[in-house]
């Protein structure tokens, strides 16, 4: 399920039959789809206000199918069907009525949304004669328009007074929401926070799934445990890892328990789509998210001759944008200089490949792709503790800790002391930024200048 503000897709893929039928899929411009459906569902001779109300319904219905990934989350390769038993009429190749075409051009892209909710309203409707329903009656709109009602008054008559017509100027290609790589312990980002929030809401209906106390976008053992139980309930392999099948099953169940694809939707609030990590990073951005990205670029740039390394400053400046463009060029991506989701996924994958092959004799190790925090047991924690204890010899403000491999309260205190000394957020959590600072300080103290892991990699990849 999409997790941001609704947008208007450039195209929509229609299955020319019932969902399970062996029918053709066709992909058409979304605006043309609306014109086709409107010409197939309603009559051009109806009063204009009735036509306007019905067009808004058609748009909103289709957008809800796309926004909730109603079909794609269940494994189908289309957005909507042309079966009126499930969706709305679409006759591939038909002519459209001129007045309907002009109205769609004027109203596009306008859809219905309930106040306080983000998702396009699932604007259920029926013809109102041979079929009746709880939603809008198409023929009923004619009578209401003849009574002098405006389009919004007609829509509120059927859907309630708490709806409005909204317009989106965000028109772009629709992409599947699965991030492209499985999510597992140690991963950080908006995609992790999305599954945490979804699991917590699903657990209201399925209390066997434990609540995740901190929906902070950090994939920890609590998150993995909740994922495993979800997978057991729904007959998926209980790995604790969110692969594509688990991602879309989560999306489908979340949409179902919140009734987002129903007229009586619980609604998706703004707070549920806000994320703690930027969706994109670009020129002018600052902060730890930029610093973390620059770290990965610095590492990849040290191993790939064609990637310009980035300086780790926390500011997305022209040099950082140039580094991003060089990475995008190397990996066959559009050279925008913007760190979007696809660029980030490819950067992360490149980093993982380097991590697996880093020299064993390096003075300090690369960030281990695992968020280290209180309660974690791992060999990377032991390495961290060794670095901190070594640094404590030079800085009395940093306490020495035993290299047990367990991240307990004493290790957290040592990390916080280091973070305070080096101007980092003293949260006691070790992600890429804090690891780079600790490993860098350790390497320079122990082995000399320019001995950070990405400053002397040992080999260069030329292609």
Image: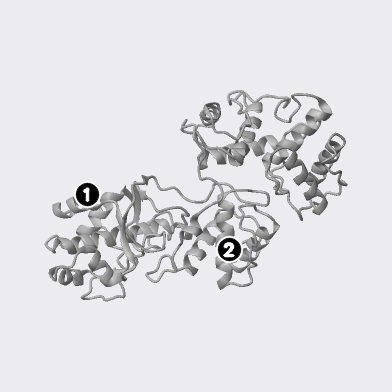
Q: If the image is split into quadrants, where does the C terminus sit?
A: top right
How many other residues sit within 10 Å of disc 2, few (<14), some (14-19) or many (≥20)?
many
Picture residue at 77% right of the left edge, 44% below the top: 417
Q: Residue at x 54, y 48 (%)?
A: 179
Residue 105 — which label? 1
Looking at the picture, does residue 111 appear above or below residue 162? Answer: above
Q: Is residue 53 visible?
A: yes
**Circle 1 Cα neighbour tier, 10 Å, few/some/many (<14 / 14–19 / ≥20):** some
Confirm whether residue 239 shows in the render.
no
> Residue 84 falls in which quadrant of the image?
bottom left
Q: Residue at x 67, y 24 (%)?
A: 460
Left or right: 213 in relation to 19 = right
Give percent across and percent down for residue 6: 40, 53
Q: Which mark is residue 199?
A: 2
Q: Earlier in the sequence, mark 1 or mark 2?
A: 1
Q: Locate residue 356, reporting x and y percent.
A: 71, 38
Q: Disc 2 on helix, strand or loop?
A: helix
> Measured from the top left, where is residue 366 in percent x and y?
72, 36
- Can you tell which quarter of the image residue 290 is in? top right
**Do the residues under discs 1 and 2 have CB atoms within 8 angstroms?**
no
Tell which of 393 and 33 is nearer to you. Answer: 393
């Amino acid at each position: 399920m999409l997790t941001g503000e609704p947008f208007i897709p450039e195209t929509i893929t229609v299955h020319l039959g019932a969902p399970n039928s062996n029918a053709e899929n066709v992909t058409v411009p979304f605006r043309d789809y609306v014109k086709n459906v409107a010409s197939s569902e309603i009559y051009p001779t109806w009063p204009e206000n009735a036509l306007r109300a019905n067009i808004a319904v058609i748009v909103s219905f289709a957008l809800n199918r796309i926004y909730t990934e109603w079909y794609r989350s269940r494994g189908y390769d289309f957005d909507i069907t042309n079966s009126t038993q499930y969706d709305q009429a679409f006759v591939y190749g038909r002519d459209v009525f001129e007045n309907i075409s002009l109205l769609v051009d004027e109203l596009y892209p306008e859809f219905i949304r309930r106040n306080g909710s983000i998702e396009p309203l699932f604007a259920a409707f029926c013809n109102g004669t041979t079929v009746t329903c709880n939603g809008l009656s198409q023929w009923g709109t004619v009578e209401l328009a003849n009574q002098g009602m405006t389009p919004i008054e007609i829509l509120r008559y059927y859907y309630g007074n708490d709806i409005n017509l909204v317009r989106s100027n965000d028109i772009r290609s629709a992409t599947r929401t699965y991030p492209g790589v499985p999510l597992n312990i140690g991963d950080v980002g908006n995609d992790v926070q999305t599954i945490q929030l979804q699991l917590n809401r699903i657990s209201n209906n399925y209390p066997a799934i434990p609540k995740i106390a901190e929906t902070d976008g950090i994939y920890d053992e609590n998150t993995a445990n909740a994922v495993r139980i979800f997978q057991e309930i729904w007959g998926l392999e209980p790995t604790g890892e969110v692969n594509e099948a688990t991602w879309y099953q989560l999306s489908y169940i979340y949409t179902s328990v919140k009734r987002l694809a129903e007229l009586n939707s619980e609604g998706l609030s703004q707070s549920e789509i806000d994320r703690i990590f930027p969706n994109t990073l670009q020129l002018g951005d600052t902060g730890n998210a930029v610093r973390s990205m620059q770290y990965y670029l610095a590492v990849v740039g040290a191993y790939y001759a064609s990637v310009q390394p980035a300086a780790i400053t926390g500011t997305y400046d022209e040099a950082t944008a140039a580094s991003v463009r060089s990475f995008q060029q190397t990996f066959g991506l559009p050279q925008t200089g913007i760190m979007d989701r696809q660029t980030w996924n490819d950067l992360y994958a490149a980093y993982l490949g380097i991590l697996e092959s880093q020299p064993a004799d390096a003075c300090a190790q690369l960030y281990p792709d695992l968020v280290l925090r209180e309660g974690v047991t791992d060999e990377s924690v032991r390495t961290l503790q060794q670095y901190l204890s070594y640094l404590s010899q030079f800085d009395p403000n940093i306490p020495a800790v035993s290299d047990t491999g367990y991240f307990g309260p004493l290790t957290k205190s040592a990390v916080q002391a280091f973070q305070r000394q080096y101007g980092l957020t003293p949260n006691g959590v070790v992600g890429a930024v804090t690891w780079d600072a600790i490993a860098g300080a350790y390497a320079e103290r122990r082995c000399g200048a320019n001995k950070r892991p990405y400053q002397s990699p040992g080999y260069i990849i030329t292609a």
